[in-house]
Image (tube, coloured by chain):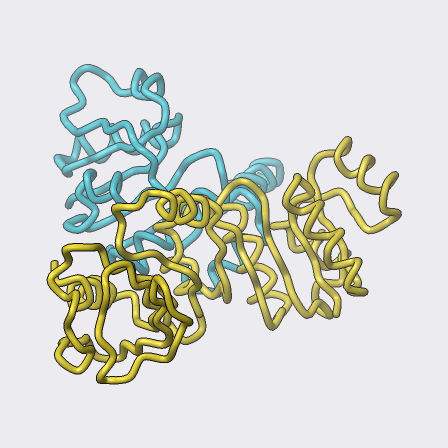
Chain colours: A cyan, B yellow
């Protein structure tokens, strides 16, 4: 699969490494060249400096042929907007985004976006740990 | 009307003042405590502190009874999300967003924002107006109908000088509304009107037909 990951922070980089090991074609996109230090030397994918909200940068990253698009930058709204561009403009078959704010996540799930809220998931996990 | 503005920067501030002068009920939502304080000091309690993308803040602001929701922060993504929350969570009938990147216009429309205003495009157009080599200029866009009103200047030496309008091949859905000759009064063009050098033509067209309208009128 050809997978674009927007945001090369801890989660983005970790995901890129996992997918790369399974021989997927991975392109990571970040605004800050420093973020790419998180990718190890053996990473075979691409690291591209660019703004995931800019259609030209997305085209350069190969979004027209991508099978999946993952938005995991620090900004909820950036993730939401990029995911909607990928889904509605470029018809990427699989689009997932991270939304920290649970209420915003609920709204966008309702609007058809596949969105995960680490806040809810992690809180739930901690609760289960406590109870076990 | 009840109008909510997200973003209390310079644009939000002057917009609020204008709307208040027109007797509307206005509320600004602004993140920065200091900015909120200075607006409240000057204009009274028309500003609340909060994130205009958050459901709880918009609920507190009474967004469900707002007639118009305008987002004018400096970030396109924040404006988009604020307008979408207002539209889909609170059913605001009309949402208006400022956009920085003119390319985002179509996306915002598709995603439910009723009107977009791009400060970048507006400034660009004004600068282009002052560059005499550009024969076509945008005067106004009627977003709901997908139409735009443009001005085309006939340069001296253009192939169409001396031709009648009926002899030009104008693209579909393009109407010449007004012709301003250099020395005479403006008139409504008829098929027999002959183009002269330095005529200014005001036309209604669709964005897709803009290029062919320009080449039909200027012969290049």
Rendered position, B75 above or below B25: above
Residue A98 in sight here: no
For the C terminus of chain B, the quadrant is bottom left
Residue, far front = B183
Relative placement, left or right, of A103 versus B196 is: right
Rendered position, B183 above or below A22: below
Residue B118 in sight here: yes
Relative placement, left or right, of A109 versus B137 is: right
Rendered position, B205 above or below A36: below
Callout count: 0
Percent across and percent down for residue B89 are 60, 65
Percent across and percent down for residue A75 are 49, 38
Out of B168 and B181, give the one closest to the viewer.
B181
For the N terminus of chain B, the quadrant is bottom right
Residue drawn at 15 percent across, 73 percent down: B163
Percent across and percent down for residue B178 are 37, 74
* Residue B189 in which image quadrant: bottom left
Residue drawn at 35 percent across, 17 percent down: A34
Percent across and percent down for residue A117 are 50, 46
Residue drawn at 34 percent across, 53 percent down: A85
Out of A1 and A60, give the one closest to the viewer.
A60
* Residue B213 in which image quadrant: bottom left
* Residue B127 in which image quadrant: top left
Residue drawn at 25 percent across, 46 percent down: B133
């Amino acid at each position: 699969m050809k997978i674009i990951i927007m945001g090369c922070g801890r989660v983005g980089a970790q995901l890129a490494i996992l997918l790369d090991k399974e021989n997927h074609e991975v392109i990571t996109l970040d605004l800050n060249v420093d973020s790419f230090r998180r990718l190890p030397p053996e990473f075979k994918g691409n690291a591209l400096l660019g703004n995931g909200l800019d259609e030209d940068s997305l085209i350069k990253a190969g979004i027209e042929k991508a099978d999946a698009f993952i938005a995991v930058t620090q900004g909820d709204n950036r993730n939401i907007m990029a995911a909607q561009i990928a889904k509605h403009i470029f018809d990427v078959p699989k689009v997932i985004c991270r939304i920290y704010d649970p209420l915003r996540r609920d709204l966008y799930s309702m609007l058809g976006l596949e969105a995960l809220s680490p806040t809810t998931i992690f809180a739930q996990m901690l609760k289960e740990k406590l109870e076990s | 009307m009840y109008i909510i503005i997200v973003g209390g920067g310079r644009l939000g501030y002057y917009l609020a003042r204008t709307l208040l002068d027109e007797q509307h009920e206005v509320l600004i939502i602004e993140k920065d405590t200091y900015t909120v304080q200075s607006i409240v000091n000057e204009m009274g309690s028309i500003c609340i502190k909060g994130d205009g993308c958050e459901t709880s803040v918009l609920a507190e602001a009474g967004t469900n009874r707002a007639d118009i929701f305008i987002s004018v922060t400096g970030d396109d993504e924040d404006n988009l999300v604020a307008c979408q929350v207002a539209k889909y969570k609170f059913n605001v009938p009309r949402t208006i967003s400022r956009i920085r990147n003119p390319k985002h216009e179509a996306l915002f429309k598709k995603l439910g924002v009723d009107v977009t205003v791009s400060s970048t495009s507006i400034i660009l157009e004004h600068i282009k107006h002052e560059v005499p080599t550009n024969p076509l200029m945008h005067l106004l866009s009627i977003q709901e109908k997908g139409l735009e009103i443009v001005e085309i200047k006939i340069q001296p030496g253009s192939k169409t000088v001396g031709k009648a309008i009926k002899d030009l091949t104008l693209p579909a859905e393009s109407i010449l509304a007004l012709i301003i000759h250099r020395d005479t009064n403006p008139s409504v063009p008829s098929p027999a009107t002959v183009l002269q050098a330095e005529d200014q033509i005001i036309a209604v067209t669709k964005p897709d037909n803009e290029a062919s309208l320009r080449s039909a009128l200027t012969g290049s």
